[in-house]
Amino acid sequence: MNKNLLLIICDFLLLSLLALVRFETPDENQPVQEVLPEDPIQAQEDIIEVLKLSLELEEESNHNMAASLQQTQQTLETTEENLQNREEELELTRAEREALAKNNDQLESDLQERIAVLEKSQQDVEQMNAALEEQRREAERKLRQMEDLQKELRDKQAAIASAETRQKELEDAQRQAEQKTRILDTQLQLAEAESRLVRENLEQARSEIAIVRDDNIRLQEHASQLATELTEGVNAQTERLTEIAEQVRQSQPRSPNLIFSDFVGSGVTIDVRYQKSTRRGGDEKLVTVRPVVVSDGKDLKAVFTWEDFGLSENDLRNENLNLRGVIRLGRYAYPLKTLDFLSIDARVLTIPLESEWVNIVETEPFYVALDPLKFPRAVLIDRQNGFYGEAPFKLELKTPKHFRIDSRFMNRLMGEFSPRESNIMFSKTGDFLGVMINKEYAARIDNFVSAETVTLGETDTLQQLQKGYTRMINQVRRLPSGVR
């Protein structure tokens, strides 16, 4: 019987017994009541009802247990189906394993073939190593032979020294033998024969040493001659290539765009400060000049014009002028020390640059044109406005140191550009020709000979400037009217 059912029955019986028993405290004031016994038939019927109820609960429990068993059996069937599926998957996995095993066997065979190839390669490498080792041993053998020859030569030299010593000893013995009696004449003859033999050997060794020394001297002379000839040939070839490159550069015109780009990209500027004379008094003025960097193959110069400074004659009369400046090369700055008035045309000024500054200038400097009339047209660059263009030019008999610029065609190039004073003039090859000193003529710069040199920061700097300005004015007055 189910445990729960027994507990229910026990509880019911306990409650029934408690219902049949009355626990009352006698009360003296109340009358005694008569307790009638409960009907035993009714109690039995109640017990029967309880038993029926317990049977119904037992049947319901059995029904639930049957349903649970049926559900468990369905679960077992599902599990069995899953097991069958797993077995099928295992069969598939077994087939895949067999395929993988076949692939593994194939890979192993391929690996064996590759191992065989690698072993063959290793054998070849070992053979090559053996050959190299044989060559090394051969070289060592030759080296040992050379060392043996050198040792033999040293031994011969030692033998020669010993023979010379022996000769001296024999000569001493000969002198002593002459003093002996005739009984020792036989021994003396033997000593003389030995001395002659040693002397012959000595002479032969000396001749061999002389031959070896002469061979070494000839070899050294031949090697020195070959080295000298090779160096001369390389230098001549280098000079020839440089000449060819220069000829090619001189024969091919450059684009004006490239010339203008090289000029702008140099990164060289000059900042000049001075006290300008005005009605209100002396005001400090800052002038920034963009020169052109030119080299004549020896010196490096920054070229510009007097007009770029903006100095007037009244400014030169100012005793407080205090002209000073700074040369800027990109991010580097150097104090301005001197400036030169050129003897060709004093309106053109130059500032010497240090030769080691070539590496600081961002573009290669322009070079003085060796053949300025090779091309009939020139490239002009306006430094102030940033314009440039081309124009025909020529030399005239009355002005051999100046070019005359034909400006009629300038307006067709670069819009409204037209030549003006202080424009820089370049040849079509990119070489420096000169500087415009007015709208029609340009000074032909082919050297940097100075007419006057001004040193800044000195007590007589103002007097030097006045002297250079006076020379410039006198020189301009002697020029033809069109060049002034």
Image (spheres, rainbow, N blue to C red):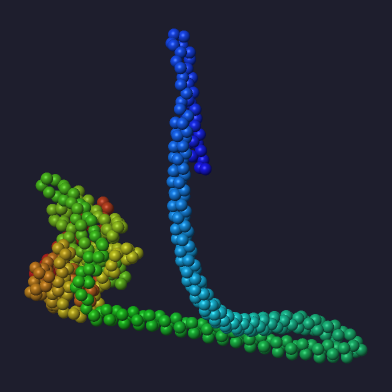
Q: Which corner quadrant of the image does residue 309 belong to?
A: bottom left
Query: Up-down: is 123 above or below 64?
Result: below
The residue drawn where x is 22% and y is 78% is 253
Image coords of residue 328 (percent x, y): 27, 58
The residue drawn where x is 58% and y is 80% is 119
Query: Up-down: is 140 above or below 452?
Result: below
Residue toward you, 436 or 175: 436
Residue extending furthest right?
183
The residue drawn where x is 17% and y is 75% is 378
Q: Which corner quadrant of the image does residue 31 belong to?
A: top left
The residue drawn where x is 35% and y is 82% is 240
Image coords of residue 277 (percent x, y): 14, 50
Q: Which corner quadrant of the image does residue 380 belong to?
A: bottom left
273 lies left or right of 99: left
Query: Up-down: is 222 above or below 94?
Result: below
Image coords of residue 233 (percent x, y): 42, 84
- The answer, for residue 20, to whether it is visible in the render is yes
Residue toward you, 186 or 354: 354
- The answer, for residue 121, to whether it is visible in the render is no
Q: How many marks?
A: 0
Residue toward you, 60 or 305: 60
Query: Up-down: is 428 above or below 70?
Result: below
Residue toward you, 475 or 284: 284
